[in-house]
Amino acid sequence: MITLPYLLQHENICRLEGKHLLIGDRRAFPFEKRFEVCSSVDQVAESLRAMVTQGGGPLEVALQTMVWVTRLMQSGELRGGFATLADAAKQLMAARPTNTTMQRALQSLLAAVKDSASDLEALDHAVQTQVDLMLEGYDRLYHQMGRMGSTLLKQDSVVLTTCFAEHTFLLSLAYAKESGKHVRVLANETRPYLQGSRLTAPSLKEMGIEVQVITDGMGASFLHAGKVDMYMTAVDLLCMDGTVVNKVGTLSNAIAARYYNVPYYAFSISPDPTKQGGADVTMEMRSPSEVTRCMGSPTTLDSIGALYPAFDIIPSELVTALVTPKGILEPEHVKRNFP
């Protein structure tokens, strides 16, 4: 039986408790299993900006925030109606501008419940029902893509990954293991939040999958030495031309993988139809202090500046194929399959 690790279980991503929304604090994991307690949409948005949760986490947090807001309105704890719900969605979307999957999910939710806007009880029921359906749908897609991803893995495959590729990548490894394949993962640390060493590696260990942590600069060396069979990552944003946007550090490994003829597979539920290519992507520049400090400790002098583009834009020619609900697609076939 396939069991998701602690970090990817719904109640540990986020949950509602009374008047509060609790968000699993991935900044503290694996050393603490801590939750950020939010009592307003402002606090949820700030938690997203502060990277309390990352990757696929903001999607689920945003959807549950919509349930929470309507529940508070229906009980009289919060005044407003559909406009209040729409304003909350706008705040959340602005908190993580590159996460267009979250943005599209919120827009889809608002469109689906708009007809119930005149009555708070009906709106509350419609939002809860729609969010449940959306989360169940995502869960099905995660397993579907995990099964597809597992077919790319061979016995004794060594997989290089960047950041925390979440459900689809981990499920690919789980399904490969279930079928009798032994797979080993090299997870780079992923500065500055260390998602690779703090999230990916402990989750894989929890699932019984062999993993070793390497620093961000080591990927090319292992590729050069012939010790990597494939490179796999998630996708924070997929453009219609097959261009991938993912955590900064992804590009250098993708270039090295292409140079050493190692395939690069990326997991994406769907492309963003408003992004035709990399030129349409607004890069999220984050605070320099996130580079000059690590886990709360300074890494250089306070008087020294830094730069932190949060994501890389990976040209489609560096991507071997994309694992999607429509199949394993070559980048040039994305637009054809997602018209």
Image: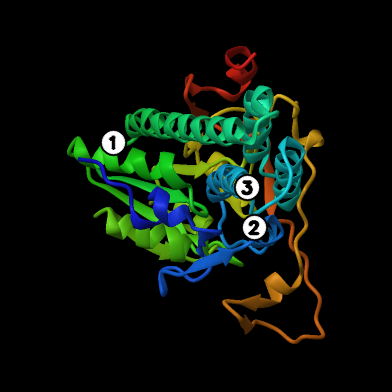
Answer with the quarter of the image where residue 201 lies. Answer: bottom left
- In the rendered image, which residue does mark 1 sit on? 154
For image coordinates 53% across by 68% down, the residue present is 27
Mark 1 or 2 closer to N-term?
2
Rounded to the nearest angstrom, the CA distance separating label 1 from label 2 is 41 Å
* Quarter placement of the C terminus: top right
Q: Position of residue 232 (x, y in %)?
A: 47, 42
Determine if residue 226 is in view.
no
What's under tag 2, amino acid-wise?
Val
Dot 3 and dot 2 residues touching (CB under 8 Å): no
Element marked by disc 1: loop
Q: Which mark is residue 131?
A: none
Which residue bears the numbered disc 3? Answer: 69
User: How many dots with numbers?
Assistant: 3
Give left or right: position of 154 versus 265: left
Mark 2 surroundings: few (<14), some (14-19) or many (≥20) residues within 10 A = many
- The image position of residue 82, as x and y in percent, is 72, 36
What amino acid is labelled 3 in the image?
Val
Q: Amino acid at mark 1?
A: Lys
For image coordinates 45% across by 29% down, the residue present is 137
Residue 276 percent location from the top left of the image: 75, 26
Nearer the observer: mark 1 or 3; the answer is 3
Mark 1: few/some/many CA within 10 Å (<14, 14-19, 20+): some
Q: CA distance from mark 3 to mark 2?
A: 11 Å
Rendered-image quadrant of the N terminus: top left
Left or right position of 261 against 179: right
Front-most of residues 66 and 241: 66
The residue sitting at the left extreme is 180
Determine which residue is flagged by label 2: 44
Between 169 and 210, the residue placed more toward the observer is 169
